[in-house]
Amino acid sequence: MIVALTITKFRSFTIPFAFIGMAVLRLPLWLNKRCRFWKLMGSGKDAQVDLPADYRHWAILTTWDNRETYDDFNFRSFVMKWFNFFGSESFTILLNPLSSHGLWSGKQPFKTQISDINHTEKIAVITRAAIRFNKLKEFRSNVKRAAEAMRNATGFILSAGIGENPFFDQATFSIWENMESMKAYAYQSFDHSDVIKLTRARKWYKEELFARFAIIDSWGSLNGVEINTNN
């Protein structure tokens, strides 16, 4: 399986076309039977995790059976031509699922074909949650410290906040130097582990997903920075 994530920065004067795209691009994605799963999403300020919605950064997540079908979509589809035409900067990363637990919109979108047991190279992570309406204020008051701890963690490379809805449906995409550094943050960082405990105790989420990926390829930049995912 190929999982593709593209984060595009739209020019200021093309922001209305970003909003239009979130509506009209659903139809060609829905009609594309080779695309197994897709999400059109917004992003946090400068594509960061814990900041307010940013109307210039937008993202598209898709899954495919193989690289050939993705490449055809990337180079020929109306969807990607829309992003490329109106965008001023773009970052794309291709991933292969190592492990995945939970649901996204009632589906398990990432089919694992290889194990993460012996994975020693750079690793990408997606965590996604649908937040309960009555827990939103409590969630937002705690997520900032976990995001700050992540950006300061050893082995951290990149993170981006994305989601279908800037308030209730949120996802974090991150890249780490290796499995050990990712696990050290996830399980040993006080701020992150404390937020996870609160998540369970306070039942913030009505749906959640956690997935790890091997990195296949990447290109482009985010906020003017070229992202190096080579091992």
Image (cartoon, grey):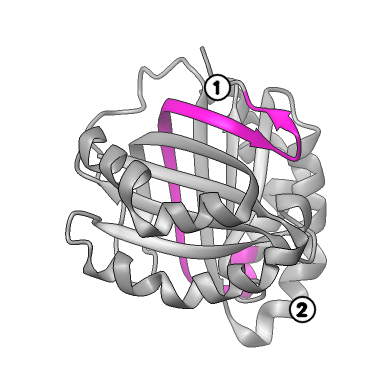
Q: Residue at x 66, y 41 (%)?
A: 159
User: Percent from the top left, x then y, of residue 79?
Assistant: 40, 59
- Quick check: 170 above or below 182? below
Q: Is residue 221 left or right of residue 125?
A: right
**Residue 142 image-quadrant placement:** bottom right
Q: In the image, what residue occupies the spot 22% across and 69% down?
A: 31
Q: Residue at x 44, y 57 (%)?
A: 209
Q: Is residue 182 above or below residue 80?
A: above
Mark 1 highlights which residue?
A: 229
| Quadrant in which residue 33 is drawn | bottom left
What residue did someone put label 2 on? 137
Amino acid type of the residue tagged 1 in the rendering: Thr
- Pick whichever, 44 or 194, lies toward us: 44
- Residue 194 in the magenta stretch? The answer is no
Q: Is residue 15 above or below residue 78?
A: below
Give the mark nearest the N terminus, 1 or 2. 2
Contact check, label 1 and label 2, Cβ < 8 Å: no
Magenta highlight: main SS: strand
Stretch in magenta? 199-227
Residue 224 within the segment the image draws in magenta: yes
* Residue 169 seen in the current view: no
- Dot 1, how many residues are within 10 Å of its Cα: few (below 14), some (14-19), or many (20+)? many
* Spot occupied by residue 42 in the image (x, y as percentages of width and height): 61, 64
Q: Helix, strand or loop at disc 1?
A: loop
Please state, as top left, top right, bottom left or bottom right, where the N terminus lies in the image: top left
Mark 2 neighbour class, 10 Å CA radius: few under 14, some 14 to 19, many 20 or more? few
Q: Which secondary structure lies at badge 2?
A: helix
| Number of dots carrying numbers | 2
Decide if residue 8 is on the left or right side of residue 146.
left
With respect to residue 134, does 56 lie above or below? above
> Could one spot residue 141 in this view of the protein?
yes
Amino acid under disc 2: Lys
